[in-house]
Image (cartoon, rainbow, N blue to C red):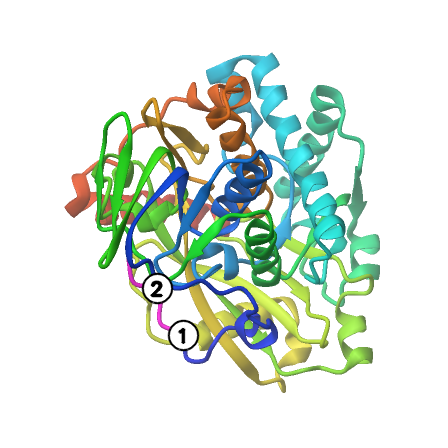
Amino acid sequence: MRLPHSAAPSWYEASAARQVHGPALAGDIQADVCVVGAGIAGCSAALHLAERGYKVVLLEAERVGFGASGRSGGQLIPGYACGQQHLVSQLGREDARRLWDFTIEGMELVRERVERHRIDCDLAWGHLHAAIKPRQREELAAWHREFEDDYGYRSTRMMERAEVESLLATDRYCAGLYDTEAGHVHPLKYTLGLGAAAQAAGAELYEGSRVTAIERGKTVTLRTAKGSVCAKHVALCGNVGLGDISPVLARRVLGIATYIVATRPLGAERAAKLIRNNIAVADINWVIDYFRLSPDHRLLFGGRVSYSGIDPIGTTRATRQRMLHVFPQLADTEIEYAWGGFLDITMNRAPNFGRLDPNLYFLQGFSGHGMVLTGIAGKIVAEAIAGQAERFDVYDRIRHHDFPGGMLLRRPTLMMAMLWFRLRDLLP
């Protein structure tokens, strides 16, 4: 799937030194495990497997972090896009609680990896979910009660309008839910750091090596343009990029285009007045706005999606306009970078992890919560390959359905369904 057009390279690419490299695969090689996709999930799986002593080959169609892992908003938050109640309804309270706890472990895993592998990725803590309307304030208050009462998560607290306005130079929000344990990170630097750690642990990285075919069996052969890997186990971590090699998986996820802009540097003083303690912020509309500051004092702002998968004309202008709804005082500020990427959603917004065969695993459907979930998912699939599948199998029990309309009509069908949610964002 082609990535959305960008008028300029992403600020992430411009500010990250790419010191992780791998040649294109040439020839036929053997491995214990082949991991497909060098985003956070794939690099995490490769790292954990290599540390366990497996011979690991990591295949990437483009470059490490080229897809969603290196393009996202970089916000580190617990939980799942589907919400905990959906998981309770499918799995029961005990296993829903286990899945919640996995994401808390995932946030701690980010902290541990950054320290252990000395990953320079601008990690910072503090996140605010912001309410635009009174009904959204009540929704956040319900989240707060649920987190504390049902999951023992006590790092959040409610903020009313005055306190939110003491942190953000905007009157757009009537309340917020502040989380001291959530945060944000430079996603590409973090992904590159994981890739470097996987290489240092012994994983073999091959970039520019798109998988063109999979031959399934007791051993699995993955073919690229100029070579092949024969492995005892395979972990498919390519998300929306897997469509050409696995139609079964492609029917369960849809790539939604999303966009981010970065202003020119604002200067330390002006930037600090916009967001006074360097937190990350996201509202809770269906089509959300999310933003944070960069270390060089830019505002990074994301807030548009395209369910058609086609990049609409005027992406930079339209995203800038959303930014000005929040911070009208930036009307004199130019946009220097604008880029897009695809996040992979499932019908129910729950993660879709499982097996196509006993030795062929997959991770997909992170649905916008990938910064934390991908990392812990890579660890959990590595455990399963090593014979400890209890945690992985909880995810495998979540029921999923194909998007309606088949591969041809599912986008138009989804676009019609999303009109209601877009209209709901406009309601009081």
Residue 1, position as x, y percentages in the image: 28, 57
Name above or below for residue 19 compared with residue 224.
below
- Which residue corresponds to mark 2? 3
Question: Magenta stretch?
Answer: 1-5
Residue depicted at 50% across the width and 73% down the height: 10
Magenta segment, prevailing SS (helix, strand or loop): loop
Q: In the figure, residue 403 lies in which quadrant?
A: top left
Q: Nearer the viewer, residue 166 or 118?
A: 118
Residue 256: where, in percent of width, then height? Answer: 37, 53
For residue 18, above or below residue 229? below
Residue 231 falls inside the magenta stretch: no
- Residue at the (17%, 39%) spot, across then down: 406
Q: Amino acid at mark 1?
A: Ser
Which of the pair 177/12 is nearer the observer? 12
Q: Which residue is mark 1?
A: 6
Element carrying mark 1: loop
Q: Relative to residue 48, is residue 68 depicted above or below?
A: below
